Amino acid sequence: MTGNAKPLRSTYKASRVWAKVRHADTVNADVLGFTGTARHPKSLAVRLPDGRVALSQRLTTALASAIAPLLVPQAGQELTKTGDSYTPTEGDAVVEVVAGTTRHAVVFPVKLKCSDLQSVPGSPASTGRPTC
């Protein structure tokens, strides 16, 4: 999302010499867990670069199908700071997300990011599970 803003102390000018303000950034986020089932995840619990853990908006069918083989559920449930529950997962899945930069940021998953999982023992590649 983008918008325009004028400096607080300036008056309105018809030429609109305003600065463009971004309210969201595209970043890579580590997948910590999911909601729904591992075969049909509804949303992802992700760790954003600033350390916050957030639940994403609902996954598209294509993204859910791509990430499902990489989700290896662990026992129990975890909670975000806001109290949202998710099933933790092991692995090194990374997704590209559009994350709001405001205090109550909304996280929109965009795509699965591929990484070199071949050399990591226990990775999806070494266990017969597909990589991205």
Image (spheres, helix red, strand yellow):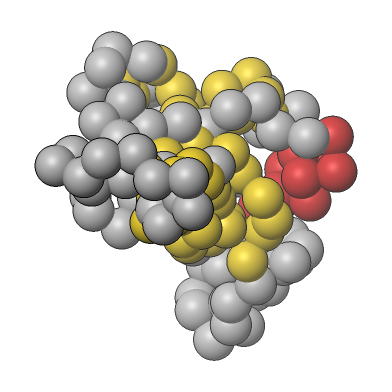
Which quarter of the figure is the N terminus placed in?
Answer: top right
Q: Place residue 105 in its image quadrant.
A: top left
Q: Nearer the viewer, residue 13 or 31?
A: 13
Q: Nearer the viewer, residue 102 or 116?
A: 102
Give left or right: position of 28 versus 68.
Answer: left
In this rendering, does residue 37 appear at all?
yes
Q: Residue at x 41, y 57 (%)?
A: 17
Give left or right: position of 55 versus 10.
Answer: right
Residue situated furthest bottom in the rendering: 119
Q: Place residue 77 in its image quadrant.
A: top left
Q: Position of residue 97 (x, y in %)?
A: 54, 50
In this rendering, does residue 44 appear at all?
no
Q: Position of residue 30 (x, y in %)?
A: 43, 55
The answer to whether 123 is drawn above or below residue 81 in the figure is: below
Q: Nearer the viewer, residue 56 or 89?
A: 56
The answer to whether 118 is drawn above or below residue 24 in the figure is: below
